Amino acid sequence: MQEEILVELFSIPIFLKPIVKVDDVQLYGSNSLTKSYKKAMIKSDTASFASGQISKLVDDGKINPCYMNKGIYRVLKWKFFANTPKKDIAAFFSMGTNKVYIIIDNNISIFGNVSDTLLGKLTIHEACHMASYNDNHSFFSLFSEELTNYYSNYFKFLFSLKDISEKRVKDFVSFLSKYENEKGLPKVLPVIEDFLDSLKKSFKGDSSKFDTLRDRYILVCKVVLGDWNDRAVRILLSNRQIIVPLYKSYASTFGITDRENFHYQEVVFPSEVVCVYSQKAPREKILSVLSFIK
């Protein structure tokens, strides 16, 4: 399907103002960039329905269009490893500032080819992360059913289970969501281990196979909750048994087939599931999500 392209002079990088410094990499914006970004949201087929709320979030300083600084790739390696959008557009949510940054390459901006479809997707995706951080309880209450279905399917795929207790899955996801905005490894890991052990009763087959998958899942969780480095990347790439069911569950639960992005955060962070699902979620729910941002 051919993407709709917003063809206009996006903005010329003059009269710049510093927006944020990320590990000594300064990002800049401008009034003209902000104005053009708002226009893009109105025209975007993926975000126009929420353009009013997005515009307000921009005015409130919660969503910040910025010019690309090539150094950002160095300090956000984890983000660009997971997501492979066009190199001229990127986005991330910072818990440190409680803001979303939409990054646009000024080189392509001058010549004027920016995908408003991708820009809208990235904006909604990162705004969902911000909403989860701002009102964790309301966020997960709103998507409790979708998350329970996703993780029920995931663990059935992972361990080849015919049945699973949805109540147990719901309680497990609720616990993960409670701690996902904190450095909660000591609290979260024992609960993950107990939950996985509870699934063993329904596993049909060699128990050693279950134990191997269980141990690999826990290892991936430790990587996601730990520091980002080359070893972490190697571990994630070498554990297809844990990663592939994430994709299968997106397809089975939401009808989402995604071959462009690398999914792995979902093993610990349920909000990531909602952020991916946001491209298919009812618009009323997305509008509700945006209202959680303070």
Image (cartoon, rainbow, N blue to C red):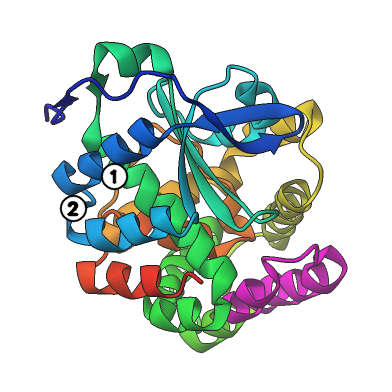
Task: Give the number of marks.
Answer: 2
Was residue 196 drawn as part of the magenta stretch in this picture?
yes
Q: Nearer the viewer, residue 63 or 208?
A: 63
Q: Can you tell which quarter of the image residue 128 is in?
A: bottom left
Query: Circle 1 — which element?
Result: helix
Q: Are marks 2 and 1 in contact (CB under 8 Å)?
A: yes
On residue 290, which mark appears?
none
- Sequence-wise, the earlier of marks 2 and 1 is 2
- Amino acid of disc 1: Gly
Name the residue tied to disc 1. Answer: 120
Do we see residue 200 in this rendering? no
Q: Secondary structure at mark 2?
A: helix
Query: How crowded is the residue under tag 2: few (<14 C-alpha within 10 Å), some, or many (20+)?
Result: some
Q: Quadrant of the N terminus?
A: top left
Classify 45 as above or below 3.
below
Q: Which residue is mark 2?
A: 48
Q: Is residue 246 above or below residue 6?
A: below
Measuring 72% from the left and 49% from the top, which residue is drawn there?
A: 216
Q: Residue at x 27, y 35 (%)?
A: 36
Relative to 239, residue 250 above or below:
below
Q: Give how far across and how far down residue 9 sits, in percent.
A: 23, 20
Left or right, 77 with respect to 56, comes to right
- On screen, 14 above or below 163? above
Q: Residue furthest front?
A: 15
Stretch in magenta: 172-200
